[in-house]
Image (cartoon, rainbow, N blue to C red):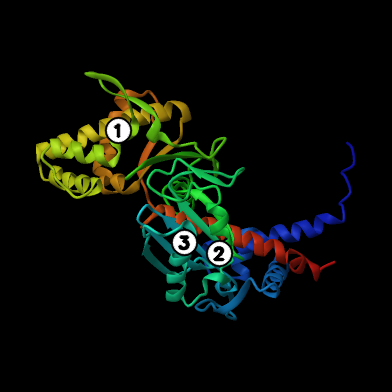
Amino acid sequence: MAPSAPATPGQPRLLRMLNDRTGLDLLLELGPLSRVQICELTGLSKPTASKLLARLEEAGLVRPVGTSSGGPGRNAVLYAVDGSVAQVGAVDVRPRRATARITDLAGTVLAEEHVPAGRDSTPATTVRAALDAAGRAAGVRADMLHSVAISIGGAYDEATDRLSLLGGTPGWSAPDALASVRAALAPAAVLVENDVKLAAVAERAQGVARTATSFAVLWVSAGLGLASDVGGMLHRGATGGAGEIGYMPVLGGPSDQRPRDFQDLVGAPAVQALARQHGIRARSAAQAVAKACAAGAAGDPAAEAFIDELASRLASGLAVITSVLDPHLVVLSGDVCSAGGEHLARRVERALRRLSKLRPALLVSGVPGDPALAGATELALRHTRDALFRASAEALVGNVR
């Protein structure tokens, strides 16, 4: 048998960095932990876990937050990520408003504020106004944020740093739009991503897709979108346009063979028009669906007919999507799907089984509040945590040579 290769000088340092990052991630995921608990969760020895915590504390990333009690022997010191080390921002941009959230490094939400987007607003002034409002509420200056992630309903091409397919969000497709936003938010790192793809990020991090091997998010709201996640990696497409399914041609039904876009079948105006055909009137598509589901559960046949037709339309698009992607799971998201909840989801599932031989699991989003904003927050936190860990890596291992 050939002798094993000798260890290289860099291996101990790499191992320490991997151990430190594992410990940091556990503290982020599970909250305060003792040295013994880290040993149990990682299989590391007590001396190794002690050195790991000492390095993280020296780098300023963790701090003691108390002691455990109730067990035999001495109380153990508990460690947690020091959230005050850095703050991040997330902004969800819509045609008429922007919502900003500020979060500390540990993931604690410090503030969330909504601001209207006026006619004379530019992308830079809109985003800065939202972050300034959230910053005042949080007691954090917007120009002190480490990173900011922006969620917007369009295709983001990272190669050109340009947005396209924006619909009703004026100003953002201009050649210098994102450059002006970055200048307004300097020195923060500015990350940009499509809102539905960010909803998938949130679904993977905290929703119903945490353990899914692969999944797709079908977003139905004022606009439509799809995000595809395979093993934690998003598919963005050549120019960021993957998932723009509003433009996907579909057939309206057996009596109407005229090609249509999927948006024409299940976009907000189409959902409201369908609701009116069944005697259901509401101020928005989501309200119409919520109203119909409540009435249908009480036995209203017209409401049930509306939900069944909407489910059939959604399934007609999903049949195409699943035949291409074959995901383990489809997550229904956006305010229309959330308003329908399980009542709508089960009907979509039945309709899909009539149309397709593929059988993905189908679940309603498990992310509370605004999934796109939650995904933007997750993206900003990941960026900042990675950056701080890289910056402190030499300090984390430098004491052991």
Q: Are marks 3 and 1 in contact (CB under 8 Å)?
A: no
Give the farthest residue toward the front: 120
Looking at the picture, does residue 38 appear above or below residue 203? below
Image coordinates of residue 176 in percent, x first then y, are 55, 51
Image coordinates of residue 201 in percent, x first then y, are 49, 49
Q: Nearest the camera: 352 or 226? A: 226
Q: Earlier in the sequence, mark 2 or mark 3?
A: 3
The amino acid at mark 2 is Leu
Residue under the image location 44 percent in, 70 percent down:
134
Q: Nearest the camera: 386 or 81? A: 386
Judged by depth in the image, the label closer to the viewer, 3 or 1, is 3
Mark 2 Cα within 10 Å, few/some/many (few <14, many 20+)?
many
SS type, badge 3? helix
Q: Which residue is mark 1?
A: 264
Count how many numbered circles sit on residues in the image. 3
Q: Which residue is mark 3?
A: 127
Q: Is residue 330 visible?
A: yes
Q: Is residue 40 visible?
A: no
Q: Earlier in the sequence, mark 3 or mark 1?
A: 3
Mark 1 Cα within 10 Å, few/some/many (few <14, many 20+)?
some
Q: CA distance from mark 1 to mark 2?
A: 38 Å
Q: Are marks 2 and 3 in contact (CB under 8 Å)?
A: yes
Judged by depth in the image, the label closer to the viewer, 1 or 2, is 2
SS type, badge 2? helix
Mark 3 Cα within 10 Å, few/some/many (few <14, many 20+)?
many
Check residue 185 in the rendering and tell me which mark sits there, or answer none. 2
- Based on the displayed image, in which of its 4 quarters is residue 337 positioned? top left
- Tell me: 20 left or right of 167: right
Q: Are marks 1 and 2 in contact (CB under 8 Å)?
A: no
The amino acid at mark 3 is Val
The amino acid at mark 1 is Asp
